[in-house]
């Protein structure tokens, strides 16, 4: 992207603000420096890449007025950070006190703070966060992180570190508290999955439909480690979300399960990416989404197989159901294959509700509206089935059903 | 099968493509792109003012447009220096519009096409042939039976003189305007040669017409323009073949193809491209398809150093249909970036894209495709299928489809697979007595069969033979 389209947001951001945020969290000097470097880098960084085809950008991040959305010293939230005793689930300020070495080693190691304009903005300004540390051999079920945003802007950071042969199941939720006109929520998630560990990270984003959202979740999987993601998006007027795994250890695996339901004028830009960088790695990407009214979905799925990734298996499916003529569904599932010892495939479909199915159901006495709703719910079933976290699955099902009930 | 093998023995494909000729030029432009060069080309062709004006306008557009550099994973064009390319070479032929008898050609040129087997193909299987050497068509003939029905098949330069109204209306106006991309603009400025095909209403040209393009000189650019107008209910199959010997410096091929498929008409456009491995092949090919018309693109991309080519169909009329069948083969040092573009702009339109690619010895293939279904193009459907076969670990195979769907009453499906050549398949064939090389050749032949079966037999044999040669190169 050219410099001409750069959004001048840093004009109203100062070193002092960043120092104040860092100071209130009692952060060590190196962390403050990382933040200040990120702030300074804003001047030269570009927005995250978006897909461009002749004549259009699929997602327009430049229209956002960050200056009016971002209020760095006014961050308010309700937060719930709980987990079982065997694992450590710490608020950011606690983690800064108790685990400085851990942070020093891993903070910014998976997502480069200066990867793009929005990651740098997030790094400079985040005021809340969670560190989840799972020691060797520990199985930690039921870690939950709930964030209810009560301010105009909120920057959140999550770090997950699992030691050898441990496992953890994390459920993250974002919602809006007191209704705000427009909000900006930005979240960075880094997962460092140690050898033979197993991470399941489910996320349910249900922010207000006036909100804007930028999130980047990325995991680094060591030998035989597994990172499974669930990425459900229902809220916001504009979401740019990336869910990514680097399979850096031999035999590592990742699954990315995505679900979205856009209505009104919502715009979801959802990326699922996996890099095969070691031998015998496996990835499975499954996303299903619905667009209704004038909503628009943009999906990019990348399966990137590196030169040394021998014996790779990589699969991707993306299906979009369009409920209205005015909605738009864009997709680009990409295969980048540099090692021939690979089995890789992707498929994508876009269509509407099957008219024969609808006819069949109505001929059996189901009201057309109920029949349609049942078919939409049925469309999500293959994705819901992949969600091993009961609570997330039930909640997502209920949110989908509620949205369908609201439909005319 | 046996007749195919006989055919293979008779034609030494490798020799046919590798030989070079001494330069044979009557007029040769300076290097680079200046207004003087453009005026010189236009004057040498004795063109009407309006064409010169279009050229000069395109030249301005060319200079104002940036090189494409920001496409994800695109071929490297840094070695291409357009200012070093000689855009125009008129070979020394007596008649400006080319001759209609092979024996009238200078021996060196006649030899070239003899070796390529073009006169032979004309006798056996074609309705007409055009042969371009450097920048000009040197041979052009059409069987009388088609001429009597009003079919026109002539060299594009001559069409400018003889059919100015048709050309003025269709030439780089609505289909491929010069403003479309940097290389379309370049093409619009320096274009020379190519074919003009006009098929009147209701006429079916049963045998294919063919044009063959040969670049012989070092460091030249070839910019032929092909314009096909198929009137209502007509049918024609156009085949283009391309080749060039290899030189140390880079050649540039930047053709322009515009196809107008009127109501109920049917056009098939087949290409077998085997440019030498120092050629940059950057083309713009596009068809506009009216109601119930059918456009079929069939391409085999074998040669070139780098190819960027995405034949495009604009399905403008209700019920229009598009078929793309493409095969790409990238060997050592080659980057074949090709695919298909389809715009569904009307209801009940249908497209099918089938793409096969093979990469080996460090070659890269990429399928880059765009399917756009506009709001209102209801009951349209598209199915895209890409399969890539990889031989070794130095090679790369990418798939980058883009789907923009603005209409809900559609059926969109995309599928892609990548895999190595199956060890089990090879083992099976070896157990039946084939050696490793032959087993691989057989697997590749089977892999590309869906493409070759769409081509006239001469071309199918040619394509198979070319791929065999490519494979022998490294399997040794």
Image: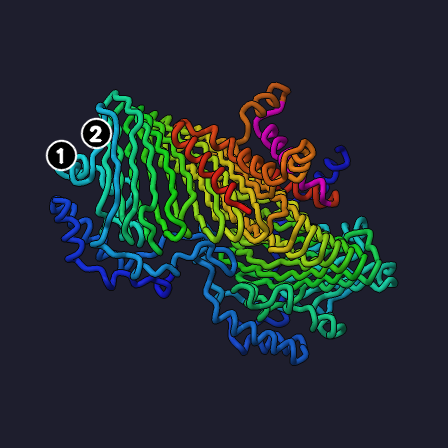
Any part of residue A193 in sight: yes
In the image, A228 versus B304, the foreground residue is A228
Cα separation between marks 2 and 1:
11 Å
Tell me which residue sits at (57%, 71%) in the image: B189
Whether marks 2 and 1 lie on the same chain: yes
Task: Tell whether position A113 is magenta.
Answer: no
Residue B253: % across, % down: 57, 59
| Residue that badge 2 annotates | A88
In the image, B470 versus B195, the foreground residue is B195
Picture quadrant where residue A168 is located: top left
SS at mark 2 in the image: strand
Q: Which residues are magenta?
A: B434-455
Contact flag, marks 2 and 1 (Cβ < 8 Å): yes
Judge from the rendering whether residue A24 lies leftward or rightward of residue A396; answer left or right. left
| Residue that badge 1 annotates | A98
Chain for numbered disc 1: A
Tell me which residue sits at (51%, 41%) in the image: A405
Tell me which residue sits at (44%, 54%) in the image: A59
In the image, A254 versus B276, the foreground residue is A254
């Amino acid at each position: 992207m050219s410099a001409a389209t750069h959004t001048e947001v840093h004009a109203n951001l100062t070193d002092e603000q960043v120092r104040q945020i860092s100071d209130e969290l009692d952060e060590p000097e190196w962390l403050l420096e990382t933040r200040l470097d990120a702030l300074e880098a804003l001047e030269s960084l570009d927005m995250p890449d978006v897909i461009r085809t002749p004549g259009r950008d699929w997602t327009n991040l430049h229209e956002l007025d960050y200056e009016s959305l971002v209020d760095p010293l006014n961050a308010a939230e309700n937060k719930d950070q709980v987990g079982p005793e065997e694992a450590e689930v710490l608020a950011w300020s606690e983690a800064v006190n108790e685990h400085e070495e851990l942070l020093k080693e891993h903070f910014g190691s998976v997502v480069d703070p200066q990867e793009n304009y929005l990651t740098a903005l997030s790094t400079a300004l985040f005021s809340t966060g969670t560190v989840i540390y799972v020691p060797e051999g520990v199985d930690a079920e039921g870690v939950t992180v709930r964030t209810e945003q009560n301010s105009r802007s909120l920057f959140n950071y999550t770090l997950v570190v699992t030691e050898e042969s441990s496992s953890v199941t994390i459920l993250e939720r974002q919602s809006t508290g007191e209704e705000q006109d427009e909000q900006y929520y930005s979240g960075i998630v880094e997962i460092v999955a140690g050898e033979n560990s197993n991470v399941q990270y489910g996320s349910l984003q249900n922010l207000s439909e006036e909100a804007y959202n930028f999130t980047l979740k990325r995991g680094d999987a060591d030998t035989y480690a597994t990172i499974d993601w669930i990425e459900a998006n229902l809220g916001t007027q504009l979401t740019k979300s990336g869910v990514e795994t680097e399979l850096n250890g031999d035999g590592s695996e990742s699954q990315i399960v995505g679900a979205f339901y856009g209505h009104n004028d919502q715009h979801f830009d959802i990326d699922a990416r996996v890099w095969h960088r070691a031998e015998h790695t496996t990835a499975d990407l499954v996303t299903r989404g619905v667009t209704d009214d004038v909503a628009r979905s943009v999906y990019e799925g990348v399966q990137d197989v590196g030169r040394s990734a021998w014996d790779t298996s990589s699969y991707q499916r993306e299906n979009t159901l369009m409920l209205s003529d005015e909605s738009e569904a864009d997709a680009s599932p990409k295969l980048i294959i540099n090692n021939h010892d690979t089995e890789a495939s992707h498929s994508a479909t876009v269509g509407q509700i099957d008219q024969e199915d609808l006819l069949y159901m109505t001929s059996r006495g189901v009201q057309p509206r109920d029949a349609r709703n049942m078919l939409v719910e049925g469309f999500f079933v293959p994705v819901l089935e992949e969600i091993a976290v009961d609570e997330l699955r039930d909640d997502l099902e209920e949110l989908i059903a509620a949205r369908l009930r609201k439909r005319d | 099968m046996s007749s195919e093998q006989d055919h293979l023995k008779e034609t030494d494909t490798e020799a046919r493509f590798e030989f070079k000729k001494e330069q044979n030029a009557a007029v040769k432009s300076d290097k680079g792109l200046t207004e003087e060069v453009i005026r010189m080309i236009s004057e040498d062709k004795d063109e009407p003012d309006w064409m010169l004006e279009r050229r000069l306008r395109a030249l301005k557009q060319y200079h104002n447009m940036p090189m494409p550099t920001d496409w994800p994973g695109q071929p490297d064009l840094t070695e291409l220096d357009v200012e070093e390319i000689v855009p125009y070479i008129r070979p020394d032929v007596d008649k400006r519009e080319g001759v209609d008898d092979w024996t009238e050609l200078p021996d060196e040129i006649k030899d070239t096409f003899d070796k390529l087997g073009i006169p032979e193909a004309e006798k056996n299987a074609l309705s007409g042939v055009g042969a371009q050497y450097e920048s000009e068509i040197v041979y052009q003939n059409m069987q009388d039976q088609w001429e009597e029905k009003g079919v026109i098949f002539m060299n594009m330069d001559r069409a400018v003189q003889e059919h100015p109204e048709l050309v003025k209306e269709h030439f780089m106006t609505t289909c491929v305007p010069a403003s479309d991309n940097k290389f379309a603009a370049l093409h619009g400025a320096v274009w020379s040669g190519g074919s003009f095909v006009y098929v009147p209403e209701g006429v079916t040209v049963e045998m294919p017409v063919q044009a063959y393009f040969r670049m012989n000189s070092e460091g030249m650019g070839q910019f032929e323009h092909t314009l096909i107008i198929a009137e209502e209910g007509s049918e024609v199959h156009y085949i283009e073949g391309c080749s060039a010997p290899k030189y140390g410096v880079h050649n540039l091929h930047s053709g322009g193809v515009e196809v107008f498929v009127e109501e109920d008409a049917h056009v098939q456009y087949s290409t077998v491209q085997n440019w030498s491995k120092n050629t940059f092949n950057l083309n713009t090919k596009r068809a506009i398809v009216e109601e119930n018309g059918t456009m079929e693109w069939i391409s085999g991309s074998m040669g070139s150093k780098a190819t960027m080519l995405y034949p495009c169909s604009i399905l403008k009329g209700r019920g229009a249909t598009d078929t793309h069948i493409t095969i790409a083969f990238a060997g050592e040092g080659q980057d074949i970036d090709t695919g298909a573009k389809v715009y569904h702009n009307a209801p009940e339109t249908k497209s099918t894209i089938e793409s096969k690619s093979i990469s080996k010895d460090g070659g890269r293939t990429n399928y880059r495709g765009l399917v756009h279904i506009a709001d209102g193009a209801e009951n349209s459907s598209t199915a895209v299928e890409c399969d890539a076969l990889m031989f070794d670990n130095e090679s790369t195979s990418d798939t980058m489809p883009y789907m923009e769907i603005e209409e809900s009453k559609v059926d969109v499906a995309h599928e892609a697979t990548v895999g190595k050549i199956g060890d089990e398949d090879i083992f099976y064939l070896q157990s039946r007595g084939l050696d490793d090389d032959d087993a691989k050749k057989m697997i590749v032949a089977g892999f590309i069969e869906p493409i070759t079966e769409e081509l006239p037999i001469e071309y199918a044999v040619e394509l198979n033979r070319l791929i065999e040669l490519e494979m022998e190169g490294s399997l040794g």
